[in-house]
Amino acid sequence: MSQNAAVSAGDPLWYKDAVIYQLHIKSFFDGNDDGIGDFRGLIQKLDYLENLGVTTLWLLPFYPSPLRDDGYDIADYYNVHPDYGTMRDFRRFLQEAHKRNLRVVTELVINHTSDQHAWFQRARRAKAGSPERDYYVWSDTPDKYQEARIIFQDFEGSNWSWDPVANAYFWHRFYSHQPDLNFDNPRVHEEIIRMLDFWMGMGVDGLRLDAIPYLYEREGTNCENLPETHAFLKKLRAHVDAHYPGRMFLAEANQWPEDAVAYFGDGDECHTAFHFPVMPRLYMALRMEDRFPIIDILDQTPPIPDPCQWLMFLRNHDELTLEMVTDEERDYMRRVYAEDPRARINLGIRRRLAPLLENNRKKLELMNTLLFSLPGSPVIYYGDEIGMGDNYYLGDRDGVRTPMQWSLDRNAGFSYANPQKLYLPVIIDPEYHYEVLNVENQQKNVSSLLWWTRQAIATRKRYKAFGRGSMKFVAGDNAQVLAFVREHEDERILVVVNLSKYTQMALLDLADYAGSTPVELYSQNRLLEVKESSYVVTLSPYAYYWLALERETHEDDGTTDEGMYELEVQGEWSSVLTESHEFAAQALPAYLRTARWFGDKRRSIQHASIADTLPVEGGGETAYLLVIEVSYREGASDTVLLPVAYAGADKAQRLLDESPRSAIARL
Ligand code: BGC
């Protein structure tokens, strides 16, 4: 049964409801025992990802490359690195992912290539001024564009490097083995369109535009976010709209909010962009136990065009970047989150989520709750769903790119290779050791972080307000408690989090929602009705609430006026029993809650799942006996037997007249 059946194939705004999972092929699973993850391995783990509930996979670069910047130094844009498999493997992976309704986002790294790319090798030998030479940016002196900052400042002293073959300096915003392409050369534009056609033509759903602010250079500027860059993006987007409607561009623009929103254009550049500035402020707010940094940065964030979406993240494959904070804030962040200088790199911190949060389960849940609640679509970094540790004694950013921990077997169940062959060693830090911290162990323990994450994702996916809703902060007297409402159509979700390590009480101004009843999303427990006067909430340390503000009983549970649930079904009606996640997760609990015969109504149903579907033939029609497992917020679960059959419109009406509570769903 597909967990993602609700992801509508045709919705061009799919990225608004996406839950994105970021992974590196080499790190996920090794399918050929050579110590390096590959597409064959990833295919074997797609069921795991589907089961986690994510809807979209973002793959880090997997193209032929000398791997001096982990694949962001591309030597051939039209192939797969042999360590990771073949083009055939990639195509099969894409097919298998799509079969599970998982979308695939890959990388379009166009600011620079590897110096091993044939274009660069040709350029350095070509005549100065020739179109071949002009694929890159050259100069006789290293003095041009002095206002451009150096990004990899721990490794590079200048954005220019001397090439003895060309007898000239070449421009690079990153490592000196990554020469920048010259976007003033129309041939470069053609090359990019060609590679975009290659990957999108194959069916890739989205492209992350790496390092997109730095495409052009102009004297007297900082060479970032230039009008020429935006003009080029509009051209690229027009091409995608004309040929690949429904696909997505994702801007990697590590910029202040007003510069980052420019990458949405007027809805005619990128569909999505990372919200870089909000990320460090989540960590600051938590450590300072104060909501101000979050409110402040979101207040500074201009509105974005309707079809566009922010992407929120807590961690990724790079250092926790501290470029978009003030100097004082950076000092503070480094002091409190990276006391050991070895944990620092460039302007950031090379640590994973769990170690940053002192492996504190409450903090992990709270930060993930913010990730899943703030306006935008969340991106989960592989391994963070189980709270993996890191190893900052490894070079560069490798400490957060170690093998995924599947089990306590050799190499964390990631590979059967000789442990010495692994592309990076597995984590053996006693606190995060793979023998204890792994997927297998967490699968077995329903109290694990993995189960929590799965449940949080499933819950988020039930409410469009998280992906599409407006956002309004709720005034409250206690700065340690952050509260806001996400609203979309009928859904209004109040999010309340306690950023403090102590129990807190807050008086929230919910007058706009007077008359509604907050219903906790996980338990479906109902809290006291909201009145005009302040609403009192008490929260234990680092507690969080997701509360649906319901106007009337059950108004929000998806049922129609007659108490029926509406479901869309294609083909046989019985496919809802096996394929519709919505049927089991929502229609059944909604029906059971109202069914007269159904046992203990004081207990809240947490979850219903169909354990078995037994066909019962009779009178030329097939009915089914469903074996349903019902679990509750507290206490033991029940097994319920429920006969179901299909009735056409007239018969259904007759039955409803006779017994108003006899129907579960309208198809
Ligand atoms: C990527 C980095 C990479 C850099 C240069 C960044 O945006 O996220 O991992 O080193 O681009 O390509």
Image (cartoon, rainbow, N blue to C red):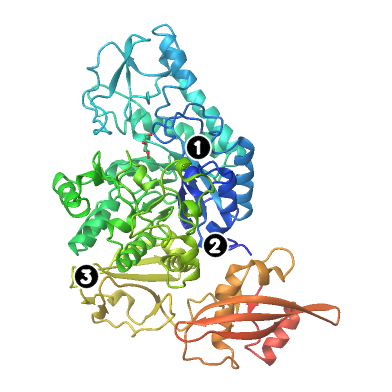
Quadrant holding the N terminus: bottom right
The amino acid beneath tag 3 is: Lys
Q: Nearer the viewer, residue 30 or 237?
A: 30
Q: Residue at x 44, y 82 (%)?
A: 552
Q: Nearer the viewer, residue 390 or 579?
A: 390
The amino acid beneath tag 2 is: Asn
Quadrant of residue 123 within the rendered picture? top left
Label 2 near ligand 1 (CB < 8 Å): no
Q: CA distance from mark 3 to mark 2?
A: 33 Å
> In this figure, which residue is indicated by the disc labeled 3?
501
Quadrant of residue 3 within the rendered picture? bottom right
Q: Nearer the viewer, residue 546 or 500?
A: 500
Of marks 3 and 2, which one's residue comes earlier in the chain?
Answer: 2
Total labels: the figure holds: 3
| Residue 258 location (% of width, % of height) | 28, 44
Q: Residue at x 51, y 27 (%)?
A: 76
**Image position of 326 (left or right of 496):** left
Of marks 2 and 1, which one's residue comes earlier in the chain?
Answer: 2
Which structural element holds mark 3?
loop
